[in-house]
Each structure stands twice: as structure tokens, then as C-alpha cells.
Image (cartoon, rainbow, N blue to C red):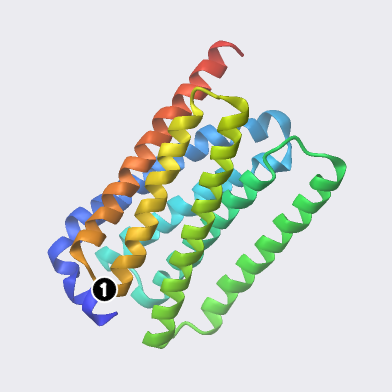
Amino acid sequence: MSEIFDLIPYYIIPRVTIEIISAVACFVLVKFMIKPYQVTREGRYIGLPLGFGFLGASYTISAITYTELANFEIIWRFELIFRAFSFVFLAVAYYFSKKPSKNTRYIWNIVFSGLFVILASSVLMTFITPQTPQDNYQILNFFVRIVSFICIAYIFIHCLREKTIAQDPYAKWVLVAYALLGLSQYSSIVWVADLSYFAFWSTLIFRLTSLAVLLAVTYKIFHIAKKGD
């Protein structure tokens, strides 16, 4: 991990800028994606805004750590926790995205409550044990990226199946966005493993492109929905 920290001065300005742009993009997505829940009050719609909200929070924390405005080690652990749970919430939201029955609503409530219990426990443990050995941190970092990649892969497969059924004209762009996000996450795994500069910049480029596509297609969908009420 020390090797990564030694490289920070060489890319701190562009990295912080990218983290801020990513966070803003996620929070804009939250603004759009909270609307279905506000209209229907169905719990299955809350997963998407929560997922992108936690993702935006993780990018915000990442920007703070690179500017060294806060205790680096403890806040970096918060970044990992929020990043992992953001993709888990997104994957769960897509899993329960079909029209719910009484049983699926019950299961969703259990899963949703369980995730928040685990999240709260993880945050509490961060305060109880703020110091993490370097080896343990590296393992946690790698594990979070693997879990995130698996969640994105599931979302991509789910969207691919739904595209073949519904033939939604915007579905292909959602697929493209999640494919790019998956490539970003895969590149981040390579970066953690061997500190490849190519993988590092690929991670950021794929992420920004993915969020840009998601913003464009989400705006288009909700703009049309607003015009047609």
C-alpha cells in the first residue's frame, strides 16, 4: 500500500477532479432515480438511489483522502465500505426489479433490513478498531473490488435478459453503461494487483464514460416520462 501512497503527488489534482466529477454524477443520478419511489412508495425502487448515493459518497470520501483533509486510514475504510454496499444495493435492486408479489415484498424487506444491519455493524467496527494492518487492508481492498465486479456482472446479465424480453430502446445504452462500469472495476482489480498505470487510468476513464452514459440515458428516460406524465 505504501507504493500507492508514494505515487499520489504525481496525480493528485486530476484524481481529485475525477472523484468530484464522479460524485456529482452519482448524486444527480440519485435525484432522477428517487422519483419512482416518491411516486409509488414501493420499496423495490429505493435500491437504485441508495446504491448510487453510497457510490457518490465513496467517491466524495476518496476525493477527501487524496487531498489529505481528514484522517487517511479510517476514512479510507469508510470509502471501501460504502463502495462495496453501493454495488450490493444496486444488484439487489435489480434482482427485485420485477413486479413484486406479497412474498417478494416480504423477502425484500428482510434483505433490505439485513443489509443495513451489516452496514451499520461495519461502520461501528471501523470506529472500534480504527487501525488496520497493511496486509489486512490490502485483502479487504481486493475483496471489495471483487465483490463489486461480481455485482456489476450480475446487473449486466440481468439487463441483457430484460433487453431480449422487453426490447426497450434505451436498454442497450444501460447495458453499455454497466459494461463500461464492469471494465472499470476489472481494471481497478488489475491496478491493486500489480500497480499498472494503464489499468489505473483505464479504471478512471471507463468509470467516467459509464457515468456519462447513465446520466444521458436516465435524463432521456425521465424527460420523456415527464412529457407524457
Tell me the residue at 58%/43% (across/down). 158
Q: Looking at numbered disc 1 in the image, what kind of residue is underneath it?
A: Asp
Q: Quadrant of residue 13?
A: bottom left
Residue 138 point in image, percent of width and height: 39, 79
Q: Position of residue 124 (x, y in %)?
A: 59, 75
Q: Nearer the viewer, residue 89 or 73?
A: 89
Query: In the rendered image of this protein, does residue 13 appear above or below residue 205?
Result: below
Instruction: Work out whether residue 22 or residue 198 is closer to the camera in this orientation and state it.
Output: 198
Q: Does residue 209 lie above or below 54 as drawn?
A: above
Residue at the extreme top: 228
Given residues 12 and 93, the one toward you in this image is 93
Query: Residue 128: which quarter of the image?
Result: bottom right
Which residue is located at x 38 percent, y 41 percent? 211
Q: Quick check: can you spot residue 60?
A: no
SS class, disc 1: helix
Is any atom of residue 17 visible in this view? yes
Q: Residue at x 34, y 62 (%)?
A: 188
From this view, report whether residue 7 is shown above or below residue 201: below
Classify the position of the C terminus by image quarter: top right
Q: Position of residue 132 (x, y in %)?
A: 43, 85
Crowd around label 1: few <14 · some 14–19 · many ≥20 (10 Å): few
